[in-house]
Amino acid sequence: MPIQLTGAILAREVHTDAAGRFHIVDPITSVVFPVKARERLAQTDKNGIAADLPPCVAVLNLWGGAPGQKYMLTATITSPVGDTAPFQVNENTWPDTPSLRLTINIKGQFGFERSGLYKFKYLIDGEPIGELALPAYWEDEVPK
């Protein structure tokens, strides 16, 4: 059976308490960038800014791997206009359990040019398994 994504979320922080319970702290619903950055951008010949992602964690719940199976998890980020850039690659080995929770620290920059829905797309061994949406806005374009 191929590995499948059964759930995913972006959060500022996650941790496991002393009783073994997993906690998701402050799920990320969107990111906002200052208008001043757009104004600086307008004075250049560039199409977008290199926007810093806030510190965050992607939590992926996976199902269906075989114990000892090696797999390549790849992430890309896609802009509202469809531009796609590789974001992260991890080689992993499936543990001796039918399901798996991965926590992936996300850091770095992405090309931000306009408000809209940016998508983290996840692939295993080149096959898409799901995505996480991240609305990103200029601060004067946040929907009310």
Image (cartoon, helix red, strand yellow):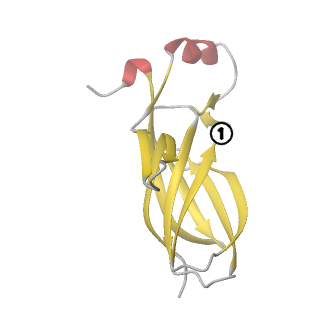
Residue 134: horizontal and vertical position, in percent?
Answer: 46, 43
Residue 49 makes an appearance in the image: no
Q: As displayed, is residue 67 above or below residue 142?
A: below
Point 62% across, 46% down: residue: 105
For mark 1, give the secondary structure. Answer: loop
Residue 16: horizontal and vertical position, in percent?
Answer: 50, 50
Q: Residue furthest front?
A: 18
Point 62% across, 13% down: residue: 40
| Tag count | 1
- Within 10 angstroms of label 1, few (less than 14), some, or many (20 or more) residues? some
Q: What amino acid type is highlighted by mark number 1?
A: Lys
Q: Closest to the observer: 37 or 88?
A: 88
Q: As displayed, is residue 38 above or below residue 85?
A: above
**Left or right position of 135 against 38:** left
Q: Which residue position holds label 1?
A: 107
Q: Residue furthest left?
A: 144
Point 49% across, 49% down: residue: 18
Point 44% across, 53% down: residue: 19
**Left or right position of 94 against 114:** right
Residue 124 makes an appearance in the image: yes
